[in-house]
Every structure is written in C-alpha cells, then in structure tokens.
Amino acid sequence: MGNRRLLFLLGVLAVNYLLFQSILVPYGSGNAPWSSVPQKYDKVRFPSLHSTPKYFTVWTPPMGSVSGFSNSSAFIAAVEKMPNLIVQFEVGDGEKMGKHNDENADLVSERNMSNDDVFEHGTDRNDARSLSEKKDVGRKGDRLDLENVGSKNFNAILAKGSNVNFSGKQFSKTEGGALVNDNNMDSREYDGVRVHTSHSSTSSTNVTSLENFAQKVVFSASNNSAAMITPRRKMRCMMPPKTRTLIQEMNHILVRRRASARAMRPRWSSKRDMEILAARLEIEHAPIVTQDKELYAPLFRNLSMFKRSYELMERTLKVYIYKDGDKPIFHQPILKGLYASEGWFMKLMEENKYFVVKDPSKAHLFYMPFSARMLEHSLYVRNSHNRTNLRQFLKDYTDKISAKYRYFNRTGGADHFLVACHDWAPYETRHHMEYCIKALCNADVTQGFKIGRDVSFPETYVRSVRDPQRDQGGKPPHQRSFLAFYAGNMHGYLRPILLKHWKDKDPDMKIYGPMPHGVANKMNYIHHMKNSKYCICPKGYEVNSPRVVEAIFYECVPVIISDNFVPPFFEVLNWDAFSIILAEKDIPNLKQILLSVSQEKYLKLQLGVRKAQKHFFWHVKPLKYDLFHMTLHSIWYNRVFQIKLR
C-alpha cells in the first residue's frame, strides 16, 4: 500500500510538472522536452513575471501551434534593462488594447498613446492627407503580462522613465541571435526615428541587422521619452470611423449649443462685447421675412435671422489682422488648386478696407492669417510622417501674439479666428488654439470640430485665378441624361466600396475610378457633371471633398456620403433644400434611393442648387452674399451666439 501511494504521489507530481511546463511554454525559462522549437533558440530566454534581467528577447511565434515556428519569420528585439514593459495588441479597427499587471491586481486596461510621445504611421496627401491619430503611452506598472504574446500583432512599449536608449547603432548581434547593447557605438546620427523592414519568411540564428526583422519596426525615442516597437497598422483615414454622427444628430447638437454659450468668460469687460450682445438680441428678435429679392428662403434655416445678422455684420463688425509672421506661411495666399479657399479668404480679408481696423482695441474679432497649406509645404519633412514641428510652429506663434498683445489672453482666443483648408489643420491647431473659432474644410466632428462654434469652410478647386467662375453652369434638368456620376481617385476606405457596388453595374450609374490626365479627360469630367442629375460626393481620406462645391458649380444636385462631415455654413444653410445627404451604409441602395425622389422634389433640389451658387463663388472683388462674405458672416454669427460677458 505504501509503494502504491508513493507511485500515485509521484504520478500526480509528474502530471502537475508537465502541465506547469506546458503553461510556461513558450514563456518559461526554456523549452519543454516535447517542444519542436528549434534548439538554435536555446539561448533565447524569457523573464519571469517578477524578474528584471539585464537582457532579454521578445519573439512572436506564428499563429497556431508552436511547432510551426521554424518555418515562420521571427521578430526579435533586445532591450537593455526593461523593467516597465507593456504589451499591446491590435484589436478591432486599429484600436489598441494594452495588457499589464497592475500593482494591486491583474487588470486589462485600454491604452491611449499621446500625441507627443509616439511616432505615427501614415501617408502625406502631399498631396497631403491626414496621418493616423497618436495615442498616449506613459502608464505605470513594472511587471509584464505575456498572456497573449503569441499573437502576431503586438507592440512592446517601454514606459517613460526607464532610461533606455534605442539609437540604431547601439545594437549588435550575439551568437544566439539576440541583439545586445554596444555602448562603444556612436548613436548621435540615429537620434529620433528608425524604421526597418524585413521581407524574410524564414527564421535565422544570425540576425545581422534590424533590417532582417519580419515585421516593420518603428523606434521612437529621446531622453526620458517612450520607446515603441510596433508593426505597421492601418491608418485612421483608411478605416471606417468608430462613431458616426449623422445629419439629424448634428441638428440637435446645434440647437443645444445655441442654447448655452461655451466660450471662455473674458478676463475683463469690453465695449465690443456689449455691441455683440446687443446684436444678438436684435438677431433673436428679427422681424419676420418670408421672401426676399436677393435671397432664396428655402436655402436658410431661418431667413429672418440670417438677413438681420448679415445686416448687423455689415454695420457693426470690425476685424483686426495680426501683422506678425513672415511669408510664405503668413500673408501669402494660394489662389489656385485644391487649397485655394484659404488663400482667397486671406487675400480678400487683408485687402478689405471696410471690416478691417488698424486699432485692435476697436476690433470684435482677430484674424490669424496663416496658410495651413504653406505651413505643410515649408516645414513638413517629406515621408517623415511626423507633423509635430508644424503644430509646434503654430504654438510658438500663438505664444508670441499672446505675449505681445493682451487680446488673446482676455478671452483665451474665443474672439480670434483662423481659416484653413488643409487636412492637417485640426491637428496643427489643437490645444493652443482650442478656443478659437476655426473655419475648416476638414469639418469632422470626430476630429474636434465644434458645431456651433467652428465653421465648416467650403473646399473649392479653383482652376483660374483671373476667372474663378469659368465653365460654371450645366444642362437644364430635362436634358440631363445620366442619373448619377462619380469619378476620382480611390482615396480612403469608402470610395472602393462605392465602385464595388456600382462600377460597370448599371448604365444609369456612371461610377468610375480615376480618370486619365489631360485636357480632354478634364473636359469629359466636367461634361459628365453638367449632364448628370446627381453628383456623388463620397469622402476621401478625410470627410471633406471639393466635389460638393463642384456639383453646385455645375448645377448638379450633390449627394454627400460622408458620416461625421458637417456641411459648409451648417449654422445658417438648410442643406435639405439643395442636396441629398446619405449615410455611408446606404451605398448598396444608392440607385433605389435616388429613383425614389419624385420629379417634383428633384426639380426643387435642382432649383435650390442654382439659387445656392452665389453663396459658393469667389470674386476678385467680393460681392454681397458671396463665399467671402458668407464665411465672414458664419464666423461672426457663431461668435454672436457663443459670447459670454464678464
């Protein structure tokens, strides 16, 4: 009986030992006897959860069994003294979930990486499209949870304060394939960002350089900053948004924010504030207007309030333009091309003698005349994927005018405004210009656009500086032979979906990809717009598109497909009177939706487009109710309804 009990006890111990070893593999201190992991990795060691070794290696086996590791690529990164390690995993739409051992309990918590700490992936649209957002990394925790390190998508992130130098030349190989620190190597030229890519599909014991990594690795480090090792992930602009705000909800937001001012209370009172408050009372009690010779009533949310507000703007508003800042970023407008809108406004505002005053004490609003396009052109390092210096430049400019003048500090910038059409403007103006009124083409509510304070600025593609209205107009409604038309580049995630459902699927739906370059094809593009009932305006990399104004230009009813996009002049215009706004999910039913619009309704929409044209035109000399005046009015209008008194 004693021998049986002893054998039973030994058997239990053996089973427990085997189970314990199976749990540790591949995270334990070595390989189990039955493991098929090649012996050439014997010198790869993984720390226990509570140990802090001088050197260690992190590797990613393939999905599936460990035995397949010998035929897969290896991801090896050696770091000196890494007590504070967080392992991040890609989940969902590129969202990152970090897992770590909290000091008090094992918790799973979401990690947000800060805008300043981590290098971001992306492409410049440079045509210039926005890069993916950066999230915050510095978090506490000094233990490592390797529960899911077998997943092929993971990021190893070193917390702040760990004093690890990731300079590229500091790493050399060891006989076991791990990289170790070589303090004799000069790393000065490698400060900043290092990028390495590997195309190898098999594992190797001789890792000669970071270029042999199986996945793209990004090192971003400086003194007392975070270091990151991450595989390439999709850019934000290439993925659907995590939240969607449709046009109905935007209307509710506007009503709520009109009811409660959100601007900063000024530090001291001003006579100009009282004048704006008086204007607000007059606008709210404007005499009823149902028809007007110059304005088409259905285009406006409230024609009476708009008309009275515009009259008061002409009579009251004074603007001070800061003279600070050097060309080409300041005071040098671009008048042609995709970003011409910000240039035309700058030119016409600085030339204006009616609204502009030289004495800032007499101003109701303050204009900061920089070009977001010229900022990108002058300072952005091509293919660096780093826009931090652009934002820092504008921060320094804001600090300068707030130190030199007292007006910015009085309201925290609430009576200051900027006009920018480049996609990166929301990022570049974040934080230091947070309370300013921003007239932005990239009017995306998920990127900080504030309905009721900020202004959705129309993006216009100007082809002729001398004659911005060249080729305007189109065929009468009964002569438009195409039901719907779209042609353009496959920017973003939405346009490929549009082509997947409708390209070459229906003769009534003229849906194409990029049209070949050349004058003939440009005229063919314009011909299609002038002969289509509806012009499809899907979002690209960002929510805005010049096709919205192009459609109005050629008297084609715009069909806007862009969740989270706030249409231009949203605070005053009723877009239901001259456009169709659809949710992105409605693309498969696009033709049915358009055919469901009655002929009577279509004729009203097309009439609304023709009546709205005057509000979307640039003129060498501004005209009443044109694009320049509409932009200035919306800035004035939002300030009127957001002002607070001392």
Image: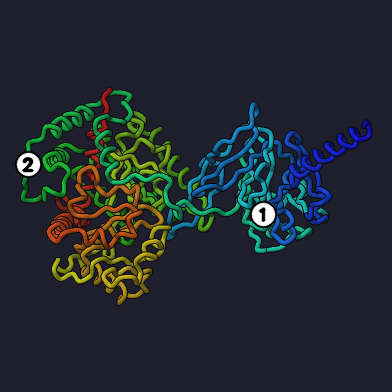
The amino acid on which the numbered mark 2 sits, given as a three-letter code, is: Val
Pointer 1 with pointer 2, Cβ within 8 A: no
Quadrant assignment, res 486:
bottom left
Residue 123 appears in the picture as rendered: yes
Spot occupied by residue 453 in the image (x, y as percentages of width and height): 29, 38
In the displayed orientation, state which residue is furthest to the bottom.
Answer: 520
> Which part of the image, by quadrant, shows the N terminus?
top right
The residue depicted at 27 percent of the width and 49 percent of the height is: 567
Earlier in the chain: of badge 1 and badge 2, it is: 1
In the displayed orientation, state which residue is furthest to the right.
Answer: 3
Instruction: Give SS at disc 1.
Output: loop
The residue depicted at 36 percent of the width and 64 percent of the height is: 501
Is 184 drawn above or below residue 5 in the view shown? Answer: below
Is 414 drawn above or below residue 603 in the view shown? Answer: above
> In whole angstroms, how far apart are the C-alphas of marks 1 and 2?
71 Å
Spot occupied by residue 642 in the image (x, y as percentages of width and height): 26, 32
Q: Nearer the viewer, residue 138 or 471?
A: 138
Spot occupied by residue 435 in the image (x, y as percentages of width and height): 35, 35
The amino acid on which the numbered mark 1 sits, given as a three-letter code, is: Gly
Q: Is residue 279 left or right of residue 13?
A: left
Mark 1 is surrounded, within 10 Å at the Cα level, by few (under 14), some (14 to 19) or many (20 or more) other residues, namely few
Spot occupied by residue 180 in the image (x, y as percentages of width and height): 77, 48
Residue 622 appears in the picture as rendered: no
Q: Is residue 340 left or right of residue 220?
A: left
Residue at numbered disc 2: 289
Q: Is residue 589 left or right of residue 156?
A: left
Instruction: Give SS at disc 2.
Output: loop
Kindly identify which numbered label has been placed on residue 183.
none
Residue at numbered disc 1: 64
Mark 2 is surrounded, within 10 Å at the Cα level, by few (under 14), some (14 to 19) or many (20 or more) other residues, namely some
> Which part of the image, by quadrant, shows the C terminus?
top left
